[in-house]
Image: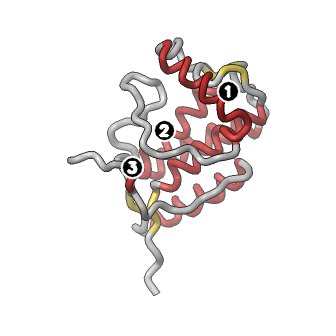
Amino acid sequence: MTPINTKAVTNRRSVHFGTLDDLLGDLDEVTKADAAGRVRPLGNWSPGQNLQHLAKFLACSLDGFGGDPPLGLKLFGRVLRLVMGKKIFAKPVPPGLKLPSGVPFLPADEVSVADGAADLRREIERVQSGAAFIPASPFFGKLSREQWIKLHLRHAELHMSFVGIDNAPA
């Protein structure tokens, strides 16, 4: 299968999450649409893979990423944060970033929407129950709890925009 240039996808869903509850609401919509056979991928990952990726990234932010990223990636993240400042937590993450192989938050090759949604719900519940984030992102450096949550909401906006939901039949 030829990879899709995700920067060029024009039919993505428009989503914005102000809170983790907003994300959970969209997750409910996706799981209901999936049960009705109305969910489809708009990028290179299946809807379930997008959900599992979000869950794994959130878990890493709570439990640790298991090692340092390559120095070049680490420096890029610090410079990006320095240049963008607070905007990095307010603006959507742009599509098209290819993750290096071996990062611990890549999804499995096949993930159902139900499994990905369960994983993501579990990690969100951990955060809502007060679980502590690691003190510093290996990419962006030291982050407050509020910054971690905003980072995850912006990241979720990107990936949930690639989970297509077809309209219900009239």
Extreme left residue here?
1
Task: Judge by depth and name the residue closer to the eye, 19 or 77.
Answer: 77
Instruction: Please state the horizontal and vertical placement of residue 50, each as a whole percent of the image.
Output: 46, 45
The local crowd at label 2, few if under 14, some if 14 to 19, many if 20 or more residues have their Cα within 10 Å, is many
Is tag 3's residue or tag 2's residue first in the polypeptide sequence?
3
Vertical arrangement, residue 16 with respect to residue 128, above or below: below
Of the two numbered discs 3 and 2 in the rendering, the one whose residue sits closer to the viewer: 3
Vertical arrangement, residue 151 with respect to residue 14, above or below: above
**Residue at (65, 26) in percent of width and height:** 62
Residue ID for mark 1? 82
Distance of label 3 from label 1 (alpha carbons): 26 Å
Residue ID for mark 2? 53
Instruction: Please state the horizontal and vertical placement of residue 22, each as a whole percent of the image.
Output: 69, 55
Count of numbered marks: 3
Question: In the displayed structure, does residue 167 sit left or right of residue 79?
Answer: left
**Residue at (36, 25) in percent of width and height:** 101
Q: Amino acid at mark 2?
A: His
Question: In the displayed structure, does residue 81 sit left or right of residue 112?
Answer: right
Instruction: Please state the horizontal and vertical placement of residue 113, each as a whole percent of the image.
Output: 45, 52
Residue ID for mark 3? 6
